[in-house]
Image (cartoon, rainbow, N blue to C red):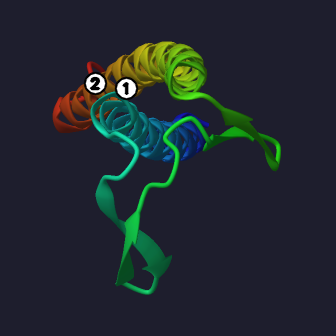
Amino acid sequence: MGQQQLQQLSQELQELEQQIEALEGEVESLRQEKTEIDEATDALETLESGSTVQVPLGGGAFLRATIEDIDEAIVELGANYAAEFEQDGAVDALESKKELVDEQISELNDEVTELEAESQQLEQQAQQMQQQAMQQQMQQMGQQGQPDADE
């Protein structure tokens, strides 16, 4: 029975580790998105109409382009929606987006912390079970080596 419980704990620990890794992957993705938002915000705050920029085409290809009007910035809002903003409005929209990303990161980090605490509890439980099993084996071995009192 103890062996089955240990196997079950081991399986639960593996599942928790997989969940933690998945959440940490999401956090990393969100941090990358946050970095991109910061870069876009910096660009919007420093660029002016008439500036030359490199526009990514995909696949590692870029074109040089001249900004006609900095007050015609299009910002992705989410859920496949985008809106055109003036320069300051675009910066504000990106800052709002960044706040949402920060909240998501915080929530995911809280989940990771909870799962790590649960994982530690299960590890301690498994260690206790292993120690108890070893003690029982030692007792059984000690009893087998002793002569019967009847002899």
Q: Quadrant of the N terminus?
A: top right
- Judging by the rendered image, the residue that carries numbered circle 2 is 131
Vertical side of 65 occupied by 102: above or below? above
Q: Quadrant of the C terminus?
A: top left
Question: Which amino acid type is marked by label 1?
Answer: Glu
Q: Left or right: where does residue 52 sit relative to residue 146?
A: right
| Marked residue nearer the N-terminal end (2 or 1) | 1
**Residue 59 placement (x, y as % from top left):** 44, 87
Q: Residue at x 57, y 38 (%)?
A: 12
Which residue is nearer to you in this view: 14 or 4?
14
Res 42 visible? yes
Q: Residues within 10 Å of mark 2 (few under 14, many from 20)?
A: few
Q: Residue at x 26, y 19 (%)?
A: 149
Question: Which amino acid type is marked by label 2?
Answer: Gln
Give residue 123's mark.
Answer: 1
Of circles 2 and 1, the one toward us is 1
Which residue is nearer to you in this view: 28 or 24?
28
Q: Quadrant of residue 123?
A: top left
Q: Secondary structure at mark 2?
A: helix
Q: Residue at x 45, y 46 (%)?
A: 29
Give residue 145's mark.
Answer: none
